[in-house]
Amino acid sequence: MEHYDLIVIGGGPSGYAGVMRALDFKKKVLLIEKKRLGGAGVYDGVLTSKTMWEYSQKVSSIREMIPDYQADYADMERKIKEAVFERKTQMTVHLNLLQKKFPEMLSYEKGCASFLDRNTIAIKKDDGSNKLVSGDHILIATGSRPRYLSHIAIDEQTILTSDGVKNLKELPESLVVLGAGVIGCEFATIFSNLGKTKVYLIDKADRILPFEDTDISEMIRESLEKHGATVHHRSSLKRMEVINGKVEYELEYKDGRTEIITVDKALISVGRVANVEHLNLEKVGVKLNERGSIANDDTQTNVSNIYVAGDVTTAMALVNVGEREARHAVVRMFGPTVKPLSYENISTIMFLNPEVASVGLSPHDCDKKGIPHKVVKVDFSTNARAIAMRQTKGFFKIIVTNDNGMRILGMRVVGEHASSAIQAVAYLIHTNQGIRELADMMHPHPSIIEGVQECLRMLLGKSIYKSTVFKDKLKCYVCENNVCTPVESLL
């Protein structure tokens, strides 16, 4: 039986990153993947949906000039396949060349892995044969899949999850999306951008994206409705079924009204569940949490030599987080002592219309934690690059401590190129710094990130535009005890 320093179960972004970090330590590593190298990060998740989003944004821009323009579905499908092929080829070639160069260090097996004991793994091959391997350490990175609902007959043809979108042969005339979180709103954005599909979004809460600030969710709602989408506010789904090849769904609203609507397709987006069923975790006593995901303490499970990373924890299903967790786990196994991972300054992007980027605390988070703070907000319409692009819908919002140090607590950006404006602020949060250094830097012009600079200048009382003139575009508040007071003297 072959023995390894590390066995990695799962060849998605997290598992792949863990393998590569272990090679840095000159360790003997085995990667086991059940289906396809790259996992959902390449095939049914981030890469495919973001390729669709990029394509839909281009179509949306064209439709601003040519309102009757409609997307070529075959062309979009071709672009998605090209992106997937490029990424999977890149990963596969890289892995193969490393195996040839370091055959004594790196091995790859395709099959379904399960535990026999804390050090021994059985690999069931496609041909039905089994292979046993052992390892000093095990990293579980088996990812997650869309959550199914027991009362909805999801067939991935007419009623789909994000995994089934690839099964579409053409753009549907109409589509209902169940779930107004990030993934649901992203797909609602994509299909409404493309111009052919009438989109309905079922929103049981008072507003879409309920975890975000109200001004963000309202701007995204307005954009969806501008692109022809209908948002069913404060509604709950009573039933959804396929009748004569169409999807019929019935809603009940909080005021007691009911409504029945028929559409071509339905997309169910109600979260994800961890892929743990075939691992035989009970054999080794690895504990699950209340969500059915693998419980861990800074990537280490309750079994000391078994670690976990990525979506299989379902705590924060982001590629960058999963990769970071896997690398961190490997350093904990083989490297020097490191401080625990921090999840407080993670930069995130929501691929909506407009784009949303965030890092750190929101004003609501500060209120819940009882942190006195200042909030400064600058409208995109004051930014030269946004004006040049003719994309002035959006804003910058920065949250700082309510003291002379004005340490940055968080930031939200909504608008074109929002993601390009987030990382410098994320670094200041990470290093616990104030705002003066970034405010005094010479930022490139014209650029979206100049909006960040203007936010900081406002806090320092030296902005170029003055809020006494542009009261609707430049705002600052001091918030304490859940009460926010406008403060013009700072501006």
Image (cartoon, rainbow, N blue to C red):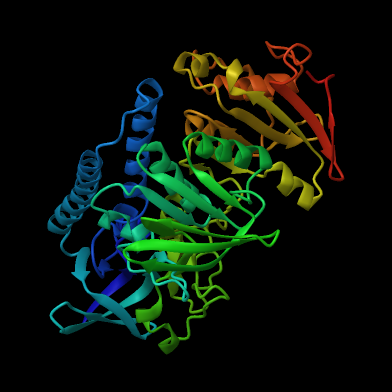
Q: Residue at x 39, y 65 (%)?
A: 143
The answer to whether one can see residue 18 in this image is no
Relative depth, front residue between 71 and 332: 71
Q: Residue at x 39, y 49 (%)?
A: 174
Q: Quadrant of residue 14?
A: bottom left
Q: Give residue 19's position: percent from left, percent from top.
A: 31, 60
The answer to whether one can see residue 110 in this image is yes
**Quadrant containing the C terminus in the rendered view:** top right
Vertical comparison of 113 with 147: above or below: below
Relative depth, front residue between 160 and 425: 160
**Quadrant containing the N terminus in the rendered view:** bottom left
In the displayed structure image, the side of residue 206 where residue 183 appears, left or right: left
Q: Quadrant of residue 297?
A: bottom right
Relative depth, front residue between 154 and 143: 154
Vertical comparison of 294 with 81: above or below: below
Q: Residue at x 66, y 24 (%)?
A: 378
Q: Quadrant of residue 363?
A: top right
Q: Residue at x 23, y 40 (%)?
A: 79
